[in-house]
Image: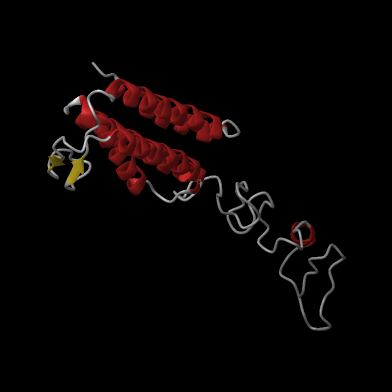
Amino acid sequence: MSIALSGAAPTYAAVPALRFAVDGPALSSLLLKAQSVDPGDPDGGDNNGGGNNGGQDKGGRDGRDHSRNDGNGPERNVRNERLDTERIVQDILSIKRECSRYDDVYRIDCLRQGIDMTIANMSDRPENRDAKKILRRASRELAAIVKTYQDDDAAVLEVPGTVNPRFKKRRTYHAVKKASLPRAMARANAVVEEAATQLLRSAENSERRYAHYQQISAAVDSTKTLLRSG
């Protein structure tokens, strides 16, 4: 016996001697059940779930649950951005703490080199592109201030790699002239303030990026406390 699954009436193979051990009502019930099967779903399952389990479809007709986060989606990107931003902020704050230990005449060069080291530590994520550009500009302007007011008669401050645990490298800081210190500090302060402002402006078109740049901007702006002579 063959049962048509397309909804047509059942047909029987031409076998004259064939007998069915099924009474009339039971056979009718069997045929009705077979005809009720959707030909597009050979397992007789619920199309919402697709396939053998007949469950609800959460992610498509393949029956897989696409609503779960596999760790590679937007949530992971946001988490990485947050960690990246925290690292940048902590680098800047560590430089602020280090430079505060030194005589005022060395602080501009200390801050300048600290910004350079912070940039070197920053990842190459596209979100950091504008921040790097702004910080590089600030570093160049601070270097120009040090060069303009440098005191060639003052001792060069040599710093061992153990001073700042976040930047384990030896470096030297140059002093600016005592007499020119107020002017040099005022110019450096303006550079820092402009960098902090530019960081905020560069992220105005992205709410998510603004939240991260706001933290970096605040850290940069806090270094102005280093630039108060007297």
Position in image of residue 207 (x %, y %)? 56, 31
Q: How is the image coloured?
A: secondary structure
In the image, is 67 to the left or to the right of 4?
left
13 relative position to 90: left or right: right
Horizontal and vertical percent position of residue 39: 76, 63
Q: Quadrant of residue 6?
A: bottom right
Q: On the image, which quarter does residue 180 sit in? A: top left
Query: Residue 207, relative to residue 225: is it above or below?
Result: below
- The residue shown at (34%, 23%) is 183
Residue occupying the point 87% across, 65% down: 8
User: Residue 61: percent from the left, percent from the top?
Assistant: 66, 55
Residue 69 drawn above or below residue 42: above
Viewer-side residue, 71 vs 192: 192
- Residue 186 left/right relative to 173: right
- Residue at the image position 33 percent from the left and 43 percent from the top: 116
**Residue found farthest to the top:** 230
Give the camera-side residue of 222 and 19: 222
